[in-house]
Amino acid sequence: MKCLVINLDRSTDRLNQVTSEFAKIGIAFERVAAVDVSSEPSNFPAARRLTKPEIACFLSHRKCWQMIADGAEQYTAIFEDDVVFRRDAGPFLSNDSWVPRDADIVKLETFFGQVRLARLASIGNGHSIGRLVGEHLGTAGYVISKAAAEKLLQRTKRLKEPVDLALFSPNSLMCARNTTYQVTPALCAQHRFLSERNTMPTIIQTAPHHPKSVTTKVRGELSRLFAHCRNGTFWRTQRVDLSLGWTPDARPAGRSSQKLKPRG
């Protein structure tokens, strides 16, 4: 599986760090130059409430989606340059045989909280996968299909919300249209959530809090309803704590050579 890493040209320290992370798991990656808000003013259509860093971040991910849409791979992994991997992440990034056939997106990271997932299925090496039903933001690591990348490019000709909300918030109709899975235990996390001191500040500004209008709330509830109907996940869900047992040095229980389960 091809792995793309978004990295600003001026962030050489972060490139060195992420290079070390990929070396740790024995996986190669391709660097994608991030859109730099300080040197690349953009006239890309976007909602007024979005900040310049949010727009730059979204356009950086769109840049990856375009590469995937133009490429031949069925599935590609996208990472931001502050990602930290579990030591057992390598086998999952070396091929896509474990990815469910109907997956548009597979979220690989954790924010160390609880998420709501549909029925879990083992994918080998002590990991499971289930449809992501609730909100789980962040875009530090995810797998996306070529077909989904093509659809997202068409649906984001005008940016309406930050990229992680568009992909992973059930209040977003764009998210509701995708079939999204979550790996547990997660394969990666952002560096800033692993360190008490924020020595590697993220290039992405946290989304500001905007008061929600009645219309926005109604649209959010309709998006949730649409997603449940589309995925058949009204009652068959469970809360999964993605913080349990997660450390960068975590290894699978038992034999690390356990084969990954084929997609079904």
Image (cartoon, rainbow, N blue to C red):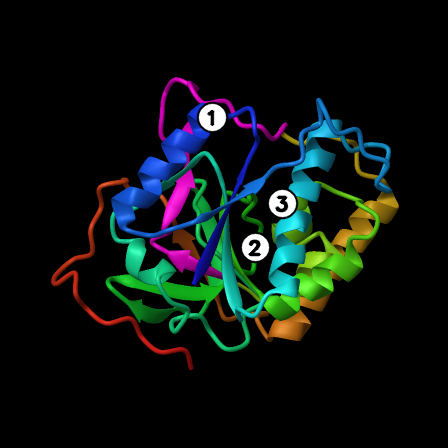
Q: Which residues are magenta?
A: 181-205
Task: Please say if 67 is above or below 112.
Answer: below
Between disc 2 and disc 3, the foreground one is 3
Does the magenta run of residues contain 229?
no
- At mark 3, the secondary structure is helix
The amino acid type found where label 2 is placed reads Gly
Q: Evaluate if marks 1 and 3 touch, with contact meaning CB atoms under 8 Å apart.
A: no
The amino acid type found where label 3 is placed reads Asp
Between disc 1 and disc 3, the foreground one is 1
The residue that label 3 is drawn on is: 164
The amino acid type found where label 1 is placed reads Thr
Residue 216: percent from left, percent from top: 82, 46
Q: Residues within 10 Å of mark 2 (few under 14, many from 20)?
A: some
Between disc 2 and disc 1, the foreground one is 1
Q: Residue furthest bottom?
A: 264
Q: Residues within 10 Å of mark 1 (few under 14, many from 20)?
A: few
Q: How many marks?
A: 3
Q: Can the viewer see residue 211 in this picture?
A: yes
Could you tell me how far apart the alpha carbons at marks 2 and 3 are, in whole angstroms?
13 Å
Q: Compare marks 2 and 1 and give the one earlier in the sequence.
A: 1
Q: Which mark is residue 134?
A: 2
Quadrant of the drawing holding the C terminus: bottom left
Task: Specify the quadrant of the image occupied by residue 190.
Answer: top left
Residue 113: percent from left, percent from top: 43, 42
- At mark 1, the secondary structure is helix
The residue that label 1 is drawn on is: 12
Q: Which mark is residue 23?
A: none
